[in-house]
Each structure stands twice: as structure tokens, then as C-alpha cells.
Image: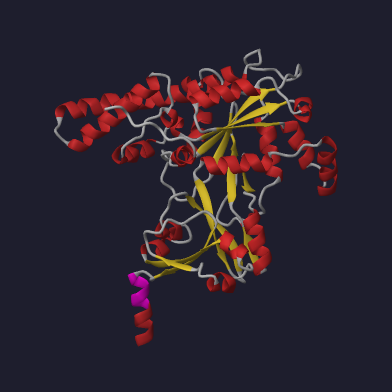
Amino acid sequence: MAAPKKKKGKKDESKQEEKQWLGKQEKNKCRVGIVGLPNIGKSSLFNVFSSKQVPAENYPFCTIKPAQTIVPVPDKRWVHLCSSFCPKSRVQAVLEVWDIAGLVRGAHKGEGLGNEFLSNIQAVDAMFHVVRGFRAKHVEHVENSLDPVRDIKIIANELRQKDIAKLAKMDETLGKRAFKTNEKAIKAEYECVHGLLEILQSGKDVGYCGVHFPAKQLEYIRSYNLFTAKPMVFLVNVSESNWLKGQNKFMEGVVAYVKEAYPGCSVIAFCAAFERKVADMSAEEAEAYLSKHKTKSVLNKVIHAGYKALNLVHYFTCGEDEVRCWTFRKGSKAPQAAGVIHGDMESGFICAETYAYKDFKKNGSTEQGVKAAGKYHQNGRNYVVQDGDVCFFKFSPPAKEKKKKESNRKG
């Protein structure tokens, strides 16, 4: 029988959105590392992010190291909700960005402090892969020539070799155990590891090999925290003159290569020097400068691309006290989304009262208007929370809390 033909159009797009998440199963982690060769503008980009850092009081329970920063994820919906509810506190979604020192050839063997840098990459959930697309005599290129596609391949190979070394050891150990036992779990994991090793040895990355992994193997893969399973956003750092002219001869080649080797990944041109200049200006100066040169900053676009690569979206909780974005993995059901606020809300989940932001705006920007239009819904535990939902969760306190309350009443 002939294989069914792929349908074109919107259905193909929906399939892309359903790309398997191969990272750790944390509900809302949003750590992105800036990686690449030395002298390509990584730290310059990080410094621009740092200038946008959210004040510490707006991001509780988080200690930021010098090479880490927290940046807001721009959202006009959140701005509108804040203006509608006029809350005492306003908390938006954020992205955590790490500045990771440059990798070089042989990093997987420890060259250039490679082990330290690779351990930092292991700690993040996605990568901004920066490549150099500018010429500058005073800034040495570690490879002595300018070739962004070659540079992408160098970093990809270092990450791949590190994963190969890790899985090769596991393959050997599990292979011996699988040969001596009839235990299904050991044989299943060996089959998974061996298959992953074959993918990597063929020159492909686990996250972009085109394989749809079964649910049981997903559990294993997520626990391995592989470099090649992490989502990527490719950033091409061009010269300021190229940026203002809106052209760069390397972009076409990078886009073509990424489309082939990393299907679905974003490729964004930016200019670190330009972004730094704009970040140092006042709002009025920046507006005049951008208007004069008929261009704009792409920093928000980069932030959104990182957030999307992590398969993250957010819902809102709204009231007079606070309007807040709560980040969660796309596709999460109501109890898991509630658990982002507190674990007790997940374990004791009763229902989720929700309405869509678009219905809020369409019906007078009031909850009364939403209810009058019949757009205020009560949902059970199988409801998949949507990006932009405004949510109110009902839950039952844990049994211990109930007993405490009962004893207090008796007392």
C-alpha cells in the first residue's frame, strides 16, 4: 500500500507545533544559554540582555550569577490586562539568559576549558547559537576565516561528540546487562541508548533526526539531558553597516543550512553593536535614531524566539492585587498548569475557571462583559490550558491541612 500523502497548508504547521519535547520535564524552566565560538559577539549580546534585566523584586526566589540575567518576555496582552485591572503588583513572564564562554574545536576532549563550558550548556534548556557574520580586522577569528555555516558545524560536532562519549559508555554497560538478563526494562533502555548512539554516529542530532520517539523512550531521553536534544535558535551577528543597509551575504547560506539540518529552528540576523548603541540611548533618542535609519531593534524578537523554542506559553491570573503571567509548557492540562503556582493546587485540583484574553478584550475588557457574553467557562482536569487564558483555579487543601483546620475548630 502506498504511503499516505502529506497534506499541505495549516495541518503541516500544526504538526510542527507538536514537535516532541526531549528536555527535562520541568513545568516552566526557561533557561537559554548563549553559545558559539570565541569573539563572535556573545558577551555583547548578553550585555544588551543585562541592560533589560527585570528588577530583583519582580522575580522572587532566584539568585542570579554574574553570567546570568533575567529578561522580560514582552506581551501586549499583559500590558492591557494591567491597565484594565490597575493591580498593586504586576509580574510578567521572563526568560533566563546565560552567557557561556566560547567553545573551540576539541572542547569535548577538554580543550580550552571545554569541560567547564559544556557543563554550563548542560544546565540550560535551550541555546541561542550565535555565529559571526561580520568582518573586523581588530577582532581575531579563532578559525582565521569567516564562514558561519562551518562555525555552526564546529559547535554542533563538539556537542554531538560529548553525547556520543556519554551514550557509548551507557551502551557498553547496558549491553552487557541486557545480554545476561530477561528483564524487559533493561533491554528496553539498551535498545533506546543503542538507537540514539546510531543516530549521533550518523552525524545527526537527537532533536533533529526526524524520529518520533515512543512514550517510553521519551522518559529515558529526557533523563539523559543530551546536548543534541536541546532546542536551538540561530543568531547571525552582522556588522552595523550591513544592518543599516539591511543586507548580509552570509544569511542566505545560514538559512538554507539550518532549514536542512535543524528543521523548524529560527534564524535571526542581529547586530550586537547596534543593539548596544540603542540600549544605551534614552527612549526619545532611540526612537529618533531608529526612525532616521528606518530600522528597529530585534531584541524582543530574539526573546520571543527563545521562549517559543522552549515550548513555553503563559496564562494570566488577574485581580486588584496582582496581574501575573504564569509560564508553563504548551499542551499542559489544567492541573499541571495550576501546579506552576503551587504543588497543592495540582494535587488538590477541582476545576479551572477560564476565559480567553481575546474574549476579554472583545467584551469591554471586564470580567462582567466576558460572563455576559457566555465566554466564562468552568473546565475539568482534562482541559488543555491555552496561551493567553485568564485562569482562576479551585482546589482542595492537602489532607494534613484539613486535619489541622478540623483540630483548630475543635480546639
Residue at x 34%, y 39% (from the top left corner):
218
x and y, in percent, of residue 31 in the image: 54, 42
Q: Is residue 319 magenta?
A: no
x and y, in percent, of residue 69 in the image: 62, 44
Quarter of the N terminus within the rendering: top left
Residue at x 23%, y 25% (from the top left corner):
175
The magenta stretch is: 399-404
Q: Write down the quadrant of residue 37 in the picture.
A: top right
Q: Main secondary structure of the magenta part?
A: helix
Quarter of the C terminus within the rendering: bottom left
Say whether residue 300 is left or right of residue 239.
left
x and y, in percent, of residue 63 in the image: 58, 50
Q: Furthest-top residue in view?
A: 144
Looking at this view, is 68 or 151 the one in front? 151
Residue at x 61%, y 20% (from the top left corner):
253
Q: Is the residue 256 above or below the residue 265 in the image?
A: above
- Is residue 66 in view? no
Residue at x 82%, y 45% (from the top left corner):
287
Say whether residue 385 is left or right of residue 100.
left
Q: Is the residue 29 above or below the residue 121 in the image?
A: below
x and y, in percent, of residue 255 in the image: 59, 25
Looking at this view, is 154 or 366 the one in front? 366
Say whether residue 227 is left or right of residue 49.
left
Q: Is residue 403 magenta?
A: yes
The tally of labels here is: 0
What is the basis of the colouring in this image? secondary structure
